[in-house]
């Protein structure tokens, strides 16, 4: 299976904050980096995401900006 | 200066593809990960982004999905 | 494999417009509906998407708005 | 009135989950497909969206990804 | 007609850059502010957007970040 | 510091709605316009955003649609 979303960052869940409609999931992707995402509460429950799980963050290239100092 | 975009991934530019309206920039963020982003051509030119530059990918948490195998 | 993106709309590719950086793909999802998406040209090439292919449009719930008349 | 958002999927509301800041709305768009969206709670209230309403999901083409098996 | 997208900024088109797949449109919304958007080339052509047109920028609240100095 | 996000709209916070996972912030950007954004609750707290603060809304051009009457 192939997904057009260009960025797939594999990691381990370090934090889950469940809300009524949405939920925040934070993942340690290595190299000192963490990625936080907000998904629907329903997806969180259906996928059973919890601390320590191995999951992959998926990010579409058009959602990425850049900062230059 | 603080930005609400939760994900800031520092890296080095490995590829730039300039188009008429948009441009693709790919960054090596360490840990074996690369992040590709599509920005406007005008931003690319104004920021003078080129191979080897140190830049930071900025991603809003609501743009992040998760895959679980 | 599970993806947190809530909307998966299966269909058949009816049109592909390749550009330098991005590409537009249009899919007939049945029920008289078509879905158009803009992905990177690199994803188009790597996935080898062409007219007639069976593919699934994936849309994160936070990207969906509603219109009421 | 014309909107640049390319995807307009007409349907009937099958579920509403109101939260403090956001709300989830699910719509049956026919052909066996449902589309879920997360909007602000304020938009939900101002538009008075409820089960059974006829509404149209609006999705910008740059928010659409594709999966190929 | 009501749209859940919370931000509607009315203005006048000051620049159009057409590409193969996408197009950039810039709008003067008053108060010294300009808003640039990237839409599909097909939407640009179908809507016949050109310099001087009165149009409204539509932005979903989940796409807005904040910077504080 | 330069950010590729093309739209930076400076204003003053007129309303904050904190939720468990997300928060809504509304900003008066002048010229009779307001911009509402949904960010994570954690960003709201870390940045200490409150009524009356001077902040800048940041919007990526690929998130902007247009309406023409």
Image (cartoon, coloured by chain):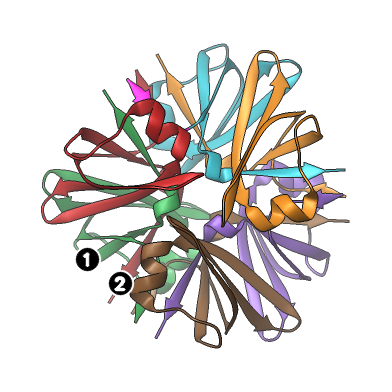
Chain colours: A red, B green, C cyan, D orange, E purple, F brown
Q: Where is residue A42 drawn, in percent x and y?
A: 47, 33
Give a yes or no on whether discs 1 and 2 share a subunit: no
Quadrant assignment for the N terminus of chain A: top left
- Given residues D56 and C56, the one toward you in this image is D56
Residue B27 visible in the snapshot: no
- C69 vs E35, left or right, is right
Residues at circles 1 and 2 in contact by the CB criterion of under 8 Å: yes
Q: Where is residue A63 drawn, in percent x and y?
A: 44, 51
Q: Which chain is mark 1 on? A: B
Q: Where is residue A16 drawn, in percent x and y?
A: 29, 46
- F64 vs C62, left or right, is right
- Given residues B26 and A12, the one toward you in this image is A12
Q: Residues within 10 Å of mark 2 (few under 14, many from 20)?
A: some
- Given residues A67 and D24, the one toward you in this image is D24
Q: Where is residue B34 drawn, in percent x and y?
A: 22, 46
Residue D55 visible in the snapshot: yes
Look at mark 2 in the image and give the residue it sits on. Answer: A68
Quadrant assignment for the C terminus of chain A: bottom left
Q: Which residue is depicted at the point 37% across and 51% down? A: B37
Helix, strand or loop at mark 2: strand
Q: Is residue B8 magenta?
A: no
Look at mark 1 in the image and give the residue it sits on. Answer: B53
Q: Which residue is depicted at the point 64% across and 19% down? A: D33
Quadrant of the rendered image containing residue D61: top right
Mainly helix, strand or loop, the magenta region?
Answer: loop
In the displayed structure, would residue D2 be above or below residue D33?
below
Q: Nearer the viewer, mark 1 or mark 2?
A: 2
Q: Residues within 10 Å of mark 1 (few under 14, many from 20)?
A: some
Numbered label attached to residue D59: none
Q: Which residues are magenta?
A: C1-5
Quadrant of the rendered image containing residue A48: top left
In the displayed structure, would residue E32 be above or below residue E2?
below
């Amino acid at each position: 299976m192939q997904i057009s979303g260009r960025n797939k960052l594999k990691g381990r869940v370090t934090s889950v904050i469940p809300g009524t409609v949405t939920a925040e999931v934070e993942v340690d992707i290595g190299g000192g980096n963490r990625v936080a995402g907000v998904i629907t509460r329903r997806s969180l429950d259906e996928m059973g995401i919890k601390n320590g799980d191995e999951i992959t963050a998926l990010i579409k290239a058009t959602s990425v900006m850049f900062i230059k100092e």
